[in-house]
Image (tube, helix red, strand yellow):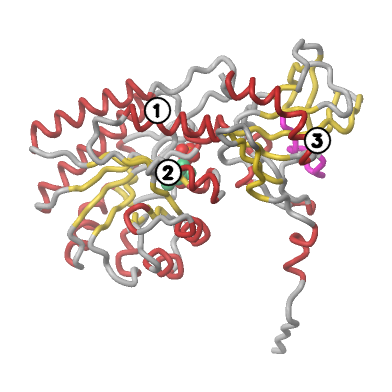
Amino acid sequence: MPISKDFQQRLSGSLPSIVDHYGTPFHLYDEKGIRKTGEALKKAFADFDGFREYFAVKALPNPEIMRIMRSMDFGFDCSSVAELQLSRQVGARSEEIMFTSNNTSRLEFEMAEAAGGSILNLDDISLIEKLPRMPELICFRYNPGGRRTGNEIIGNPIESKYGVSHNQLLDAYRRAQAQGARRFGLHTMLASNELDYNYMVETARMLLDVIEWLSEALSITFEFINIGGGMGIPYRPDQQPLDIQSMAQEIGTAFDQFKGRHGYVPRLYMESGRFITGPHGVLVTRAINRKEIYRTYVGVDACMSALMRPGMYGAYHHIDVLGKESTEETVDVVGSLCENNDKFAIQRTLPEIEDGDILYIHDTGAHGHAMGFNYNGKVRPRELLLRMDGTVELIRREETLDDYFATLQFEPDKLSI
Ligand SMILES: *Cc1c(COP(=O)(O)O)cnc(C)c1O
């Protein structure tokens, strides 16, 4: 199932007035759905002492959304200075922020350390020497290489640029310890948009095995394991949602076994983005042109600047036409870029669409607006939030051409050589 029936029902009642007031296109997020998913996640993992979700900021980096996450006691997973700033801006500090960066610059480390700090999750052994100083609590991102496969989207860990290799891992913790680290965590991320919970259970088991090995070799204990993000959502109508109850139960069994052997368990952390917000957003756009050539094209007033996933990954996003239900024709739904990838749907059977019809594209609550770009000088649309009480709030204005041209205003700077 794409977006929930409940969200869909509330949408069909309120969309006409929202469109009237704000105009199209826009992303609209559903606070009720986000909270429901967040609370369900907390409930499923309630038996894990100190369980924490670090919301992956990159999925939906909007302060109002991040305030919702904070009110559910979630931390933030950041991988850039901008994401760190956003997290601090909504009040997150030190161990409420996990800094999981790749190819990290010195500036990023300085920023991560500044203004209250964060948990550093190092992506490479060479970074130990590049840190401004070794913090008390340190985490490494583990890349198991050939020891385990990633899921289809992540691919083969051997080809992945992320993480510390198996052969470097022991040395990494030993060096961190020698430089003053006293508290330890271990992280990995091997799946993306995964709907089979067994994958997450396997990841947790693998991390427990690795900390068992490291703990014994170095006489240290681990405060947490972080199984990363990548929990999937059903984008297609025939897909089943991820079974988080079974996932929690089976990871719980692995934790119990670990406790039996060692007398303690680490905390369980995760950093989901898509799972939390993905199904609770729609991109609302209006049909503005219809073109009949070799195929029928429905041109809408949004383009890849608002949602890249279909064009970039060939990803499926369900589409509904407001007030129309019967399926009548097969069309491509396209944006306006001079780029033939700029299609929201290819050969999709939809109700017959006329100019002026309102379409809503499902599951744009994660990696949607955030991934948009300005190619062709197309600007990103506004973001709206449907509050619990049914009111709608602007949470980011649309970009303007002035924003787009802003970087063309600068002091002349010439170099003669
Ligand atoms: C992108 C990313 C996530 C979130 O991924 P989702 O698919 O949105 O759950 C979490 N952790 C890291 C390190 C990431 O790069």
Residue under the image location 55 percent in, 29 percent down? 279
What residue sits right under mark 2 in the picture? 71
Q: Quadrant of residue 72?
A: top left
Percent coordinates x, y for residue 278 in the rendering: 54, 34
Relative horizontal placement of residue 258, taking residue 236 as reference (left or right)? left
Depth check: give the residue in front, 256 or 296: 256
Percent coordinates x, y for residue 146 in the rendering: 33, 38
Secondary structure of the residue carrying tag 1 is helix
Instruction: Tell me, yes or no, if residue 184 can be seen here.
Output: yes
Of the residues under marks 2 and 1, which one precedes in the sequence? 1
What residue sits right under mark 1 in the picture? 40
Of the residues under marks 1 and 3, which one precedes in the sequence? 3
What residue sits right under mark 3 in the picture? 20
Relative horizontal placement of residue 114, taking residue 273 as reference (left or right)? left
Residue under the image location 23 percent in, 62 percent down? 136
Q: What residue span does the magenta drawing correspond to?
A: 336-344
**Vertical arrangement, residue 162 with respect to residue 257, above or below:** below
Secondary structure of the residue carrying tag 3 is helix
Task: Give the residue type at disc 3.
Answer: Asp
